[in-house]
């Protein structure tokens, strides 16, 4: 049996639905990470243990050796009962900012017409990393004149959803922005994210000399992306908003052309 080959290929119109799904999935992935971090926090565990003991005392569910071996498992339902509301509250407080960020990402004009938006500059593009016929990851680089815009879809641009042609201004900006970056969890230990990032950096800086810097949002809730950016030489530009119950600090990182070193 032939060994599957890995390849990075450009976006095709047939990938449109898959790309939208993956972008939404990537935007919501921090929620699971945030919830797990809160679940395992010492304060959360202490609250869970304390409430569970109070509930077990109230229900008189302490171990009863008279019931035999199974009597020692009698407190377990009490711990499970207290875990459910705590997990619900953690998700409740973490979900809102992450879900709002996801909605903002999905309502930006680059996803209205992916081909039209990312074909305006030779340095822009969307690429998909595959291993054989398996999806591994994707990355989208916007080097257009409005690359730094975070404005949602306007009424005019929404015409594209109804099959009407929408014109976007062409040109290359001083600043390129990585709008979307995702690698499937199974391929992160192998470093697929590093290969994908190096590919897009090479394309950004070699396709058009107008591009002098590449920016990307960084979040501690997406550690594999954060590690890839730091390894590639991205430096902290400024801190942004905090999200979640524990106030995770989002930030913006930048890599200047003068500090970029292509990987051979």
Image (spheres, rainbow, N blue to C red):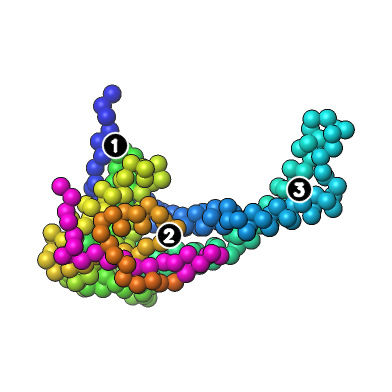
Residue at (64, 54) in percent of width and height? 45
Mark number, residue 68: none
Residue at (58, 56) in percent of width and height? 41
What residue range appears in magenta? 242-264
- Label 2 sits on residue: 220
Instruction: Give the image location of residue 180, x and y in percent.
Output: 34, 59
Q: Is residue 19 left or right of residue 203?
A: right
Instruction: Give the image location of residue 10, x and y in percent.
Output: 23, 51
**Of residues 155 and 83, which is closer to you in this image?**
83
Q: Is residue 111 left or right of residue 61?
A: left
Instruction: Give the image location of residue 258, x and y in percent.
Output: 15, 65
SS of the residue under disc 2: loop
Between label 3 and label 1, give the one nearer the viewer.
Answer: 3
The CA span between labels 1 and 2 is 31 Å
Above or below, 74 against 224 in this view is above
Query: Visible in this render: residue 148?
Result: yes
- Label 3 sits on residue: 78
Above or below, 127 against 242 in this view is above
């Amino acid at each position: 049996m032939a060994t599957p080959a890995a390849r990075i290929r450009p976006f095709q119109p047939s990938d449109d639905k898959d790309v939208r799904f993956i972008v939404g999935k990537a935007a919501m992935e921090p929620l699971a990470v945030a919830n797990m971090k809160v679940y395992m926090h010492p304060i959360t565990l202490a609250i869970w243990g304390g409430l569970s003991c109070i509930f077990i005392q109230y229900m008189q569910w302490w171990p009863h050796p008279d019931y035999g071996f199974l009597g020692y498992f009698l407190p377990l339902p009490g711990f499970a009962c207290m875990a459910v509301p705590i997990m619900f509250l953690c998700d409740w407080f973490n979900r809102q900012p992450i879900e709002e960020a996801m909605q903002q990402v999905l309502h930006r004009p680059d996803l209205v017409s992916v081909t039209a938006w990312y074909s305006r500059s030779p340095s822009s593009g969307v690429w998909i990393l595959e291993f054989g016929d398996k999806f591994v990851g994707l990355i989208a680089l916007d080097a257009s004149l409005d690359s730094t815009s975070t404005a949602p879809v306007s009424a005019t641009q929404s015409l594209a959803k109804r099959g009407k042609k929408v014109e976007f201004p062409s040109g290359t900006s001083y600043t390129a922005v990585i709008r979307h970056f995702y690698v499937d969890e199974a391929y992160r230990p192998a470093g697929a994210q590093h290969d994908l990032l190096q590919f897009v950096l090479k394309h950004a800086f070699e396709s058009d000399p107008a591009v002098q810097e590449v920016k990307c949002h960084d979040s501690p809730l997406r550690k594999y992306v954060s590690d890839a950016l730091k390894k590639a030489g991205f430096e902290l530009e400024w801190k942004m908003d905090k999200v979640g119950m524990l106030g995770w600090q989002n930030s913006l990182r930048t890599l200047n052309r003068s500090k970029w070193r292509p990987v051979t």
